[in-house]
Amino acid sequence: TPPEEDGRSRLVQEMERVGRLHPRRMEVVTLHLVLGIPLAEVARMLSISERTAFRELAAGRASLASALESRPNPDDDHDDDHGNRRAS
């Protein structure tokens, strides 16, 4: 699997896990960020203005960023290269 597809899969999984996005916001984020459809086309597909699509995308990105920041970092409680436990 190409690395960018893995990244998109992880993004979709994270979006599903978060699940707090407004349905239209989720559509805009999915269509634009995951499928790579230009924002102007996303707006046409959803029958919304480009400005609304942009706002929904910005809000969706902010929600996802916040959710990712609040997740525990899986690297925080691992051993370093010398077998020593790292503190968070």
Image (cartoon, rainbow, N blue to C red):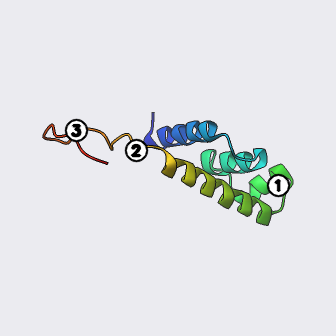
Foreground disc of the pair 3, 1: 3
Q: Secondary structure at mark 2?
A: loop
Residue 60 shown left or right of residue 22 in the figure: left
- The quadrant in which residue 55 appears is bottom right
Image location of residue 72, percent across then percent down: 44, 43
Residue 48 lies, with reference to residue 85, above or below; the image says: below
Residue 44: mark: 1
How far apart marks 3 and 2 lie (CA) works out to 14 Å
Where residue 17 appears, as percent x and y from the top left, is 60, 36
Q: Amino acid at mark 1?
A: Arg
Q: CA distance from mark 3 to mark 1?
A: 50 Å
Q: Earlier in the sequence, mark 2 or mark 1?
A: 1
Report the amino acid beneath label 3.
Answer: Asp
Secondary structure at numbered mark 3: loop
User: Which quarter shows the N terminus?
Assistant: top left
Q: Position of residue 71 (x, y in %)?
A: 48, 44
- Residue shown at 67% from the left, 45% from the top: 30
Residue in the picture at 76% in, 55% down: 41
